[in-house]
Image (spheres, grey):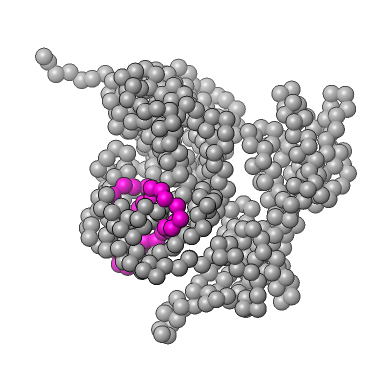
Amino acid sequence: MRIKRLPESIVNKIAAGEVVDRPAGVLKELIENSLDARSEKIQIKIEKGGKKLIEVKDNGIGIHPDDILESVKRYSTSKITGIDDLYCINSYGFRGEALSSISSVSRFSIISRQKDFPLGKELFIEGGVFRYLSDVGAPVGTVVRVRDLFFNVPAREKFLKAEKTEQKHLIDTFLRYAICHPNVYFTLQVEDRILYNLLPSTIEGRLKNIFPKAENLLYFENENSTGKVYGYIASDIKSKGFVYINGRPIKNSILTRIIRSKAGENFFVVFIDLPPYFVDHNIHPSKIDVRFRKEKPVYDLVRSALDRMSKPKLHFSLSQSKVRYNAEFKILGQIENTFLVVYYDGEIYFIDQHVASERINYELLLKKYRTGNIPVENTNLKLDLMPDQVGKLNNLKEKLKSLGIVIYQENEQFYIKQIPSFSKVKDIKRFIYRILESEYSEIEIENFLGELACNISVEAGDILSDEEAKNLLKVWIETDNPNLCPHGRPIYYKIPVENIRKKVGRK
């Protein structure tokens, strides 16, 4: 028999077996693309264990309209220009062979728009066959929908596990990325239920949101000439753990054994930062299995960090340890009329007065929203609605009223009768149109309250008296989440006094 070249359609299906062995493999590739697009919000929806639907929607930078077709071709990339780049990968990177493989074994659509273009592009591919590419109205960002996975490869579909098993793998993949990107707003919808709604937070805060029953998070860290390692062990949660190298989730059996020797069966997350050239991610198509140029220094780095846990204590956190204001909290001053400098328990805190004030006002507004007590003022704003928006607006009237937004109808026309007294008219109209387009009204309401809180908060540049600073801190430290502002920005940065001693040579 003569040797011949396989058709591209069969090559793509073979490649799909390397990249897309199950629905979770699809989700992994799509999340990584969204993260590399600098998305601040990633919404995921799955149905029937991912066999019927995997949808990933983000608000990233989007794909250039001229590149939309290139995005699904094999060997397309946005990160590699030469062979050396394979060994110094600092991002997840856009991999065309992944989308090419996915689209060859599913009914695949992608809609994307960049901010510089009035319209987006929609591409539909069915089982590797191009169906159409057209202009479409779309928000900035990208939506990928993968339907009927393996519909044209029944032999591979038979190897998929039960729906609940595939769903478990999908959730596991979701959590891997949600944990190591706590600054990104993640949601996961399974069938008709929102399973996770993870607002931006710290790593510790994200872990608390995912595992609300985790009372004891033990923190550890170590740093030397090889690199840095840090992480948490949940001493009261039995579960598998996650290991990350340079922000990428990985598997390494030796590292897992080392960690398990200290963590036992408890859940753990371990982050290892190494020079990019020190790690080879290219030994497997999924890039999850890795090897190191020098293994022993990496393993010693991790062992040393864990050995320091012989007498573990909780990692200090304002929210976790429930610190409350007392006389030991000393105000040292104000920098650039923006940052309050505070000493507490051996550490110096630099607190952004604006975002601390935002956190206070956001939580006050949230309470007022829940009790319907937001102060209002009268107005008479006309609302122009599409027919399909009218029904949704009627369903949201009571929630909007609790926000201080009262809407009434006269004949076929809708008007805004009242708005929050400290809001701006243009912000109200923008919010209403936004909530009508969104699938998650509560999320949009929380975002809106954050915007209102910003309007009434102390500004950067405001000069605060000692008494004003003291009162601000006293109220801030009592908030439910003193770590982050409503938009996900950190409120403070702290430096241990011990580090200062070391820098100046004082023992």
Residue in the image at 70% along x and 54% along y:
362
The kind of secondary structure the magenta stretch mainly shows is: strand
Q: Position of residue 398 (x, y in %)?
A: 78, 37
- Image quadrant for the C terminus? bottom left
What residue is at 65 percent from the left and 71 percent from the top?
325
| Residue 172 drawn above or below residue 128 | below
Residue 99 can be seen, yes or no: no
Residue 180 spot, x, y in % from top left = 45, 50
Farthest left residue? 1
Residue 188 position (above or below residue 91): above
- Drawn side of residue 448 relative to residue 343, left or right: right
Q: Nearer the viewer, residue 133 or 27?
A: 27
Position above or below: 242 against 314: above
User: Is residue 246 found inside the magenta-colored segment of the image?
Assistant: yes
The reply, left or right, for residue 181 in relation to residue 7 is: right
- Which residue is drawn at the image coordinates 88% and 27% (left, top)? 410
Q: Is residue 52 magenta?
A: no
In which quadrant of the rendered view does residue 20 lie?
A: top left
Residue 217 image position (x, y, % from top left):
47, 59
Name, please, the residue furthest toward the top: 1
Q: Residue 430 location, x and y as percent?
A: 72, 39
237 sits to left or right of 431? left
In the rendered picture of this protein, how many numbered marks are placed on residues?
0
Kindly indicate the quadrant of the structure image that contains residue 21: top left
In this orientation, does residue 445 appear? yes
Q: Which residues are magenta?
A: 224-252
Give the residue displayed 73% in from the left and 56% down from the top. 364
The front one of 235 and 430 is 235
Q: Nearer the viewer, residue 46 or 248?
A: 46
